[in-house]
């Protein structure tokens, strides 16, 4: 059985690009993204799967990257906040967040946006109540919730 | 040019935040960065008997283990005049300087390793033996003592009053008396506290989560006996703070020591659990109120005692008596503030420190008085409207609270409220309407900014300010753009760096009233400087003109008499072969505090729905109307207000540190068990700004916004719960077990 501190060299596919990265068995996907790949748009809020700030898409599905080990993500498609915009053109959800002022400090925002992108693509944003429910895994301590609902509703309508 | 101040401009830093490119403190990438992890004490009081660090030192990747046994002895020089954000007396925590344990969670060791995983693992291998001493871990209001002289001098007074409260109370025909409990609460900003310390020779750079880079630098200079000039603090984005990042906490000192020890940059990031011990919190408080009124509802006597917890090693105190001193007209007042020493980490400011507590008690007691009088709660407030600050004996610089009441009541539909409790029922759901007043005193402080006009038409405005979320980047950009006559996208505001002109603390809702006026002054200074240059030139459109003949207009300079076109700044720079021109400006509080009392006001109306069988409280809607003076940006201002409502909802219904008195520690130190509002808790929030422009308080006419937005929300909800159920829950949060109990 390998030691927990054993180094693993693996390939992470993030936002369409392949990255060779050395991690140990305990390295979470979140810490690999932030500290090894310097993709710091994905935020660490609690490291316990409770706040949603680290939400990314794994093969298109929402996951909290703090509860996933980096080695478990090998061979899968990871999409982070850095992978949404096309150059200077914001993704519709990103644009809607700016338009509706759906954040203040901005720290929970990447996780909120990734959750919204996932929920919209899963067709789970059909009503305000459904949006509130789907977005309730992402804490916003600045309290921008009603603006987040407006942004997600708007973006879902534009994409739909 | 259209007005820019007052426009709902989208955040200028919005694209950076939504793309993940805004760089928060933990995210600065430095070559050779090492990672630190703390070991925290597990007893509430005593001393460290022994530390076995061998296993930790032998663990893979470990660069250093530091404890009080080998940490450098630091000078910890006293700051001549302590900043308001610090505890005003006692001894700030001296980290790793001796074997004493002052509270559960005090750092006793720090481990530095090549990776975060290695550091965290090695920290768990450090074995610490403790000798426990008797500890005070139970709050006993009877043990309250007055705050120290230094706290009193800083405005946290032990008593205040006027008239004869005792005598008038005895003669009052209508009286209410109640005790309210407000639990220990934690800021829980989503970004954890974090510091990267980087030594380069004698120079130290800190990438830190802080609401005040200039003070962070000063504190660390004093702790280490360094020159401030050798320290730079960088903090361009702050992921929420709510007061927890006002002062410099011991982990910053630890990071600096650790970086020195290993000779590499070190990052020390607190875990979510550690945030309940290694930084501050809103202290537990208990308050006792007695209100006496005549039969028409006019207050004739008011007695208010507030008792709060405080740590034992230093004394942090709050202005909890401030709202009672001036919110209502009452000739006979006595208020008292006491502190109960406990073995805990030190509390600290949390959004509207003290005031939110005082408002809670006062506004719940006013509701109880309205019931006793058989009077509408709003009418009771209007009958006791304070036309001046009676305690200070000064007129308000402005006060549009009446308009707040009227606007919010109308929008909410307060007239539909049936006075009797339990009278608005639909099936098993009881609906209740409640309201409360909000107030927060408005302050100003001195600050500076610089403005550079550049050849490409941009203006770069700089100040060592902070933006923890309210929108400093955006609102300051608007102030500068309007003053310079430039479009918003031709102005860039830079903040969060001690290399920039001095800024005051980003807290207490003072940023715009303080620094906004400095930005105006800096813009005017650079316009004046450019005008001097072009007047003194041999040629050009303004060569040789008198000083008062050239003025700023339309994004450039023009003749004061209005003849000829205005010439854009950038064109003037080109004409005179200047790359840029730069000037600094500052603003200080003036004589206004001698002439006026200033405060922001609000009126909050809420509807609750209570499931009678389950005891669950939902808040389908809140309406708040606010007098915050002039509003620079209604979009971001509205976000602050709805954010305050959400914070107040958490305070009323969810938030509470579960305290284990056996160990003197918080048991629910995580975001699954310390409950905060989630999206599904918050359906409809409305914030309205009543028109005002308080030029008597400061030239920009703003009063301040962040704190007032959370005041009054929790009592309005508690009052609505009474209206729904007939149950007066006087201890927050209003949980199902309390409602059913």
Image (tube, coloured by chain):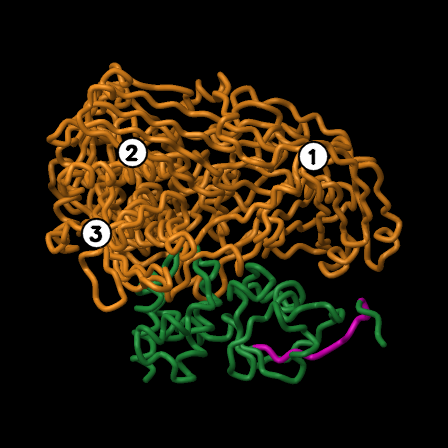
* Disc number for residue A62: none
- The label nearer to you, 1 versus 3, is 3
Give the chain of mark 1: B
Residue B557 vs residue A89: left or right? left
Task: Tell me residue B414's x, y (percent).
Answer: 14, 52
* Disc number for residue B45: 1
The single residue placed furthest to the front in the displayed view is B741
- Tell me if mark 3 has few (under 14), some (14-19) or many (20+) residues whose alpha carbon lies within 10 angstroms of its own: many
Give the chain of mark 3: B
Give the chain of mark 2: B
Q: Which residues are magenta?
A: A5-14
Magenta-span inclusion, residue A9: yes
Q: Main secondary structure of the magenta part?
A: strand
* Disc number for residue B421: 3
Residue B559 is at least partly visible in this image: no
* Residue A72 against residue B669 in the figure, above or below: below
Disc with the residue nearer the chain's start (1 vs 3): 1
Q: Are marks 1 and 3 on the same chain?
A: yes
* Residue B325 against residue B422 in the figure, above or below: above
- Give the distance between the C-alpha atoms of the residues marked 3 and 2, in whole angstroms: 64 Å
Quadrant of res A117:
bottom left
User: What colour do you see for chain A?
Assistant: green
Residue B741 is at least partly visible in this image: yes
Disc with the residue nearer the chain's start (1 vs 2): 1
């Amino acid at each position: 059985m390998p030691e927990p501190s054993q180094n693993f060299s693996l390939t992470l596919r993030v936002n369409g690009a392949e990255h060779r990265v050395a991690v140990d068995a305990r390295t979470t996907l979140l810490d690999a993204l932030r500290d090894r790949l310097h993709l710091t748009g994905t935020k660490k809020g609690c490291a316990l799967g409770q706040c949603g700030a680290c939400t990314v898409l794994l093969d298109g599905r929402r996951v909290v990257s703090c509860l996933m080990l980096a080695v478990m993500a090998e061979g899968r498609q990871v999409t982070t906040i850095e992978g949404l915009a096309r150059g200077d053109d914001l993704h519709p959800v990103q644009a809607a967040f700016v338009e509706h002022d759906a954040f203040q400090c901005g720290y929970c925002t990447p996780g909120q946006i990734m959750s919204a992108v996932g929920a919209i693509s899963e067709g789970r944003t059909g009503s305000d109540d459904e949006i509130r429910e789907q977005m309730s895994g992402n804490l916003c301590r600045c309290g921008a919730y009603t603006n987040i609902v407006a942004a997600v509703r708007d973006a879902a309508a534009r994409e739909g | 040019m259209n007005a820019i101040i007052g426009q709902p401009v989208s955040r200028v830093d919005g694209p950076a935040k939504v793309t993940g490119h805004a760089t928060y403190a933990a995210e600065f990438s430095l070559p050779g960065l090492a990672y630190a992890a703390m070991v925290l004490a597990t007893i509430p009081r005593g001393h460290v008997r022994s530390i076995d660090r061998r296993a930790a030192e032998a663990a893979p990747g470990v660069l250093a283990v530091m404890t009080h046994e080998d940490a450098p002895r630091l000078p910890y020089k006293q700051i001549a005049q302590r900043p308001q954000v610090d505890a005003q007396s006692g001894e700030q925590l001296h980290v790793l300087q001796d074997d004493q344990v002052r509270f559960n969670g005090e750092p006793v060791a720090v481990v530095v390793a090549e990776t975060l995983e290695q550091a965290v693992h090695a920290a768990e291998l450090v074995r610490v033996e403790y000798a426990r001493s008797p500890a005070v871990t139970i709050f006993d209001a009877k043990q309250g003592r007055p705050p120290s002289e230094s706290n009193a001098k800083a405005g946290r007074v032990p008593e205040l009053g006027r008239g004869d409260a005792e005598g008038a109370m005895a003669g009052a025909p209508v009286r209410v008396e109640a005790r309210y409990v407000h639990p220990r609460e934690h800021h829980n900003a989503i970004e954890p506290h974090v510091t990267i310390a980087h030594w380069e020779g004698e120079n130290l750079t800190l990438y830190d989560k802080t609401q005040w880079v200039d003070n962070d630098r000063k504190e660390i200079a004093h702790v280490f006996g360094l020159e401030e000039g050798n320290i730079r603090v960088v903090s361009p984005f702050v992921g929420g703070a709510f007061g927890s990042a006002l002062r410099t906490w011991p982990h910053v000192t630890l990071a600096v020591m650790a970086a020195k020890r290993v000779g590499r940059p070190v990052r020390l990031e607190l875990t979510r659990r550690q945030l309940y011990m290694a930084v501050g919190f809103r202290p537990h408080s208990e308050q006792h109120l007695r209100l006496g009124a005549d039969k028409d509802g006019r207050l004739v006597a008011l007695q208010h005692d507030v008792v709060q917890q405080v740590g034992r090693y230093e004394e942090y105190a709050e202005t909890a008596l401030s709202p009672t001193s001036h919110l209502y007209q009452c000739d006979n007042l006595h208020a008292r503030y006491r502190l109960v020493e406990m073995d805990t980490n030190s509390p600290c400011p949390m959004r509207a420190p003290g005031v939110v507590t005082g408002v809670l008690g006062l506004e719940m007691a006013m509701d109880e008085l309205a019931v006793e009088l058989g009077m509408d709660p709003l009418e009771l407030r209007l009958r006791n409207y304070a036309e001046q600050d009676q305690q200070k004996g000064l007129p308000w610089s402005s006060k549009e609270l009446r308009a707040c009441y009227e606007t919010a009541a109308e929008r909410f539909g307060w007239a539909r409220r049936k006075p009797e409790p339990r009278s608005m029922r639909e099936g098993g759901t009881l609906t209740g309407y409640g309201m409360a007043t909000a107030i927060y005193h408005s302050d100003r402080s001195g600050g500076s900014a610089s403005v550079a006009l550049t050849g490409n038409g941009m203006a770069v405005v700089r100040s060592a300010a902070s933006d923890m979320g309210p929108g400093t980047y955006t609102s300051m950009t608007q102030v500068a753009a309007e003053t310079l006559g430039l479009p918003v996208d031709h102005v860039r505001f830079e903040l969060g760096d001690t290399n920039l002109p001095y800024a005051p603390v980003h807290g207490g809702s003072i940023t715009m009233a303080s620094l906004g006026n400095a930005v105006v002054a800096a813009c005017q200074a650079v316009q004046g400087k450019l005008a001097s240059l072009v007047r003194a030139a041999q040629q050009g459109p303004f060569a040789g003109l008198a000083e008062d003949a050239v003025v700023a207009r339309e994004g450039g300079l023009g003749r004061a008499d209005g003849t000829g076109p205005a010439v854009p700044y950038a064109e003037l720079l080109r004409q005179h072969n200047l790359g840029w021109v730069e000037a600094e400006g500052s603003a200080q509080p003036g004589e206004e505090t001698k002439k006026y009392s200033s405060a922001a006001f609000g009126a909050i109306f809420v509807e609750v729905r209570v499931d009678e069988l389950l005891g669950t409280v939902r808040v389908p809607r809140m309406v708040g109307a606010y007098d915050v003076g002039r509003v620079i940006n209604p979009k971001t201002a509205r976000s602050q207000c709805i954010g305050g409502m959400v914070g107040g909802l958490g305070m009323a219904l969810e938030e509470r540190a579960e305290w284990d008195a056996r160990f003197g520690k918080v048991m629910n130190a995580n975001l699954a068990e310390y409950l905060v509002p989630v999206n599904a808790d918050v359906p409809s929030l409305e914030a309205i700004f009543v028109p005002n422009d308080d030029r008597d308080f400061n030239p920009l006419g703003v009063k301040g916004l962040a704190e007032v937005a959370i005041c009054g929300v929790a009592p309005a909800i508690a009052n609505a719960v009474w209206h729904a159920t007939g149950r007066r829950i006087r201890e927050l949060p209003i949980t199902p077990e309390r409602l059913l109990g």
